[in-house]
Image: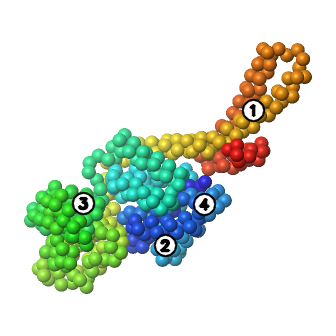
């Protein structure tokens, strides 16, 4: 099976493209069900975050889906034309695809190098695929390996030093706009993981008050209680925005929650005091046109990239160390896969050669009139050693070709050359 990935991230696609390609868990589950129906011989996992949407898949060596089919399928799931997204997509296969996933889950490909949120997001993506039975032994094993690699990278390098996440970087950005927080009111729209991480960092700045609002009020109450904030009714959102100094939006809403039409009266109501709006949502929760209102400062997830770039130099040594570790683990992954793929074929070949040896011994021994028991044992040992030496090169070649994705080709050739029936495998 070929392992492949096609997708986009914060470096290849702007936010207006990423938000159109984004999947929530329910959408991903539905799409994976369609994928397995259309491509029953393949596996799939969809990883979709605020910074990326990626389709990981397997396919038979000469089967579907190929790159063009995968791009078309991905576009169709989001009601897009392939030409609308193809320029923003990357595609990797085999060792490059495995290395890419290891880098992603280890946060070496994140907007914020060293953040830990991507590991949980990847685990959730695999869980969704598992529930839909879209991930089989190959992708489940691959993602499980990626989780172990990520833990090793974070444990053995310095990339995770400090408390970094998209949420914390958003707060760093707010700190560059406001010199202090003790007289500020902060509104968090949404009560998911991103919002909670952001709130936890914000509370260390000691703002005057923090409000949490969410469509499900009970969830807002729960989060507010845990963090010492106040829960507010979602229906009062416009009023809450007008009374806030910083608004951080992080929801899965498919449409902008804050628009010019809803908030055009707010600048005058606030007497034109600055209002910072930070949009962590994909799709975007805040209409970028709001930035045209007087003293409204709107920043989305791509704007945060400018700050995260500043973390690169201080983490570069850890990144280099992490890259080397990942490259070694990619080799380990394919060597292990080679052993598992080649094992049944080598076992069957060994059985076939021993059958031939035993048959020839049974033919030859009666004709050797002077052979005693010691001679017979020596002949059998010689035959066993010969079989072992014959097997050495096929075993070595099969293990070596697995990293190139060609183990199955050689295994199939051996099956035909030595007439290895399926029941022997």
- Residue at figure coordinates x 29%, y 46% from the top left: 161
Q: In this view, does 33 lie to the left or right of 418?
A: left
Q: Which of marks 1 and 2 is nearer the N terminus?
A: 2
Give the structural element (helix, strand or loop) at label 1: helix
**Crowding near the residue tagged with mark 3, few <14, some 14–19, many ≥20 C-alpha atoms within 10 Å:** many
Contact check, label 4 and label 3, Cβ < 8 Å: no
Q: Earlier in the sequence, mark 1 or mark 4?
A: 4
- Residue at figure coordinates x 37%, y 40% from the top left: 156
Give the structural element (helix, strand or loop) at label 2: helix
- Residue at figure coordinates x 61%, y 45% from the top left: 341
Read off the residue under disc 1: 354
Contact check, label 1 and label 2, Cβ < 8 Å: no
Percent position of residue 371, x then y: 85, 16
> In the rendered image, which quarter is residue 214 located in?
bottom left
Q: Which of marks 4 and 3 is nearer the N terminus?
A: 4
Q: Which of marks 1 and 3 is nearer the N terminus?
A: 3
**Crowding near the residue tagged with mark 4, few <14, some 14–19, many ≥20 C-alpha atoms within 10 Å:** some
Read off the residue under disc 3: 196
> In the rendered image, which quarter is residue 37 located in?
bottom right
Read off the residue under disc 2: 77
**Crowding near the residue tagged with mark 2, few <14, some 14–19, many ≥20 C-alpha atoms within 10 Å:** some
The residues bearing labels 1 and 2 have C-alpha atoms spaced at a distance of 53 Å
The residues bearing labels 1 and 4 have C-alpha atoms spaced at a distance of 34 Å
Contact check, label 1 and label 4, Cβ < 8 Å: no
Query: Does 232 appear above or below 202?
Result: below
Percent position of residue 296, x then y: 21, 75
Quarter of the picture holding the N terminus? bottom right
């Amino acid at each position: 099976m070929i392992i492949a990935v096609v997708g986009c991230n914060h470096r290849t696609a702007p936010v207006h493209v990423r938000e159109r390609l984004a999947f929530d868990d329910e959408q991903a589950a539905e799409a994976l069900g369609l994928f397995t129906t259309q491509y029953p011989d393949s596996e799939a996992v969809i990883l979709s975050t605020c910074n990326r949407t990626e389709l990981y898949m397997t396919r038979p060596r000469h089967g579907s889906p190929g790159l063009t089919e995968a791009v078309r399928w991905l576009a169709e799931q989001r009601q897009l034309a392939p030409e609308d997204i193809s320029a923003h997509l990357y595609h990797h296969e085999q060792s490059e695809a495995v290395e890419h996933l290891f880098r992603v889950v280890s946060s070496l490909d994140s907007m914020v190098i060293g953040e830990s949120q991507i590991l949980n997001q990847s685990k959730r993506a695999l869980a969704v695929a598992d529930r839909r039975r879209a991930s089989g032994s190959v992708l489940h094993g691959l993602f499980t390996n990626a989780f172990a690699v990520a833990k090793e990278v974070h444990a053995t390098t310095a990339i995770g030093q400090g408390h970094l996440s998209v949420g914390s970087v958003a707060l760093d950005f707010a700190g560059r706009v406001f010199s202090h927080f003790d007289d500020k009111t902060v509104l968090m729209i949404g009560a998911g993981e991103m919002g909670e991480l952001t709130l936890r960092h914000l509370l260390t700045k000691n703002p005057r008050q923090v409000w949490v609002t969410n469509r499900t009020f009970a969830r807002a109450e729960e989060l507010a209680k845990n963090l010492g904030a106040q829960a507010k009714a979602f229906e009062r959102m416009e009023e809450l925005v007008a009374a806030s100094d910083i608004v951080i939006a992080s929801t899965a809403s498919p449409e902008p929650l804050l628009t010019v039409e809803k908030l055009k009266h707010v600048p005058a109501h606030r007497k034109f005091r600055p209002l910072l709006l930070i949009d962590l949502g994909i799709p975007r929760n805040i209409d970028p046109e709001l930035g045209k209102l007087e003293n409204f400062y709107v920043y989305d997830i791509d704007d945060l990239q400018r700050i995260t770039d500043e973390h690169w130099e201080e983490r570069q040594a850890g990144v280099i160390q992490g890259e080397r570790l990942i490259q070694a683990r990619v080799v380990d992954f394919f060597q292990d896969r080679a052993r598992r793929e080649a094992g049944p074929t080598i076992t069957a070949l060994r059985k076939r050669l021993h059958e031939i040896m035993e048959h020839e011994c049974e033919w030859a021994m009666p004709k050797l009139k002077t052979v005693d028991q010691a001679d017979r044992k020596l002949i059998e040992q010689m035959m066993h050693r010969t079989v072992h030496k014959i097997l050495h090169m096929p075993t070595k070649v099969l293990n070596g070709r697995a990293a190139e994705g060609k183990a199955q080709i050689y295994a199939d050739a051996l099956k035909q050359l030595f007439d290895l029936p399926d029941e022997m495998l």
